Amino acid sequence: MKVIIVGAGIGGLSLALSLHAAGIATEVHEAVAELRPLGVGINLLPHAVRELTELGLGDELAELGIETHALVYANRHGQEIWREPRGRHAGYDWPQYSIHRGRLQMMLFEAVKRRLGADAVRAGHPAVGVDPDSGVVTLFGGETARGDVVVAADGIHSALRAQFYPDEGPPIWNRRVLWRGVTQDAPFLGGATMIMAGHQDMKFVAYPIDPAVAARGASLINWIAELRFPDTVEWRREDWNRPGVLADFLPRFESWDFGWLNVPGVIAGAERIFEYPLVDRDPIGRWTFGRVTLLGDAAHPMYPIGSNGASQAVLDARTLAYELATRGDTVQALAAYEAARRPPTTAIVLANRGNGPEQVMQLAQERAPDGFADVHDVLSRAELEATAGAYKKVAGFDREALNHRPSLTPPAALG
């Protein structure tokens, strides 16, 4: 069996490593001419860290990321709404990491080159179409590649998804814009805490991402400022990754000095700022067409709520490799993969549209917009615990379920 992977992002590279570990031949075709460590911070939840650890990458993750100790939700005044331990500090068998997206991608890329060979990823090879019956992928310029299975891991603007859903149109903008940056500053809340403050129309997220900076007593803070705009406002929707302009959003956060974190100071301290409209796509009823299936953002692009995008792509990759390795028939394997992954990721996309676990911030804003003396005057402990627990189940990282789930490493790969 040979698998062609279209896209060398986190999902595509995780799949290449998983297939190689299972003894399945693969090659990766990437559109860009050179992979570079682009982007800003992301979080890897324990279920994804488990999968990368089982691929032998646990030590490298620990060197590159900050192990997250706690997550705190706060209102726009900096008052704590909910705090919970994360990763191993919450009883999981695996940590949660905050990490620079580009460093994670390059770590996976280097692992692919070491294990599969220097030419395993063929950069500058954008795919423009595929024959689902033969598994022949047409690349830009007329070159072709053929696989028994073709996996479209080419992101939210997937060319292969567009072939099967030609009338889908551009990603759906929900009238929110994110500005993202990285700032070196003093550690906050112990130096290993992720915070989300505000509500659904105005939010600030921050977490440290660099253990080398932390070792010097400082913190490299990845931050996200988010605003919702009225329906009458037109935005630069066609620009998915462009330099941000402070005047567009900083004035709205000027009063957000929490004492333990000076939000306007952190924003102003960034050397570069990027702007991203918050977009996703409607869930689709089918991922698999003949020999072709979808993975990661090509299958289920979602809002970055609940820290799930990269983690779900890793889970896709591990599940697909497991099914291909343990079932003798590729048709059955692709059907099993889709049956295992499409329903839960559909549920996450929809849950994220409803704010996911961040709904507690919105409830606090609605019930006590001027703040509170005691959060339990606004939200009961039971209500807070139920919101957090329900999302973990939807997203597949309920602690007991994850800790006791069988491995996705195929028996043959275990030796």
Image (cartoon, rainbow, N blue to C red):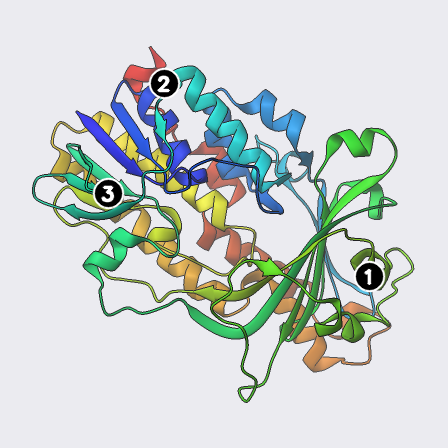
The picture quadrant where one finds residue 245 is: bottom right
Indicate the position of residue 319 as horizontal and vertical percent values: 33, 36
Where does the N terminus fall, quadrant-wise?
A: top left
Lower sequence index among marks 2 and 1? 2
Label annotation for residue 116: 2
Q: Dot 3 lies on which element?
A: loop
In this figure, which residue is indicated by the disc labeled 1? Answer: 263
Inter-mark Cα distance, 3 to 2: 25 Å
Residue matched to label 3: 141
Residue 91 can be seen in this image: yes
Q: Position of residue 287 (x, y in %)?
A: 24, 52
Q: Is residue 69 left or right of residue 395?
A: right
Q: Is residue 40 above or below residue 242?
A: above
Q: Nearer the viewer, residue 222 or 316?
A: 222
Q: Residue furthest bottom?
A: 232
Q: Nearer the viewer, mark 2 or mark 1?
A: 2
Q: CA gap, disc 2 to disc 1? A: 44 Å
| Residue found at the very far right of the displayed protein | 259
Q: Tell me: residue 98, above or below residue 347.
A: above
- Residue placed at 67% from the left, 69% from the top? 361
Specify the quadrant of the image occupied by residue 331. Answer: top left
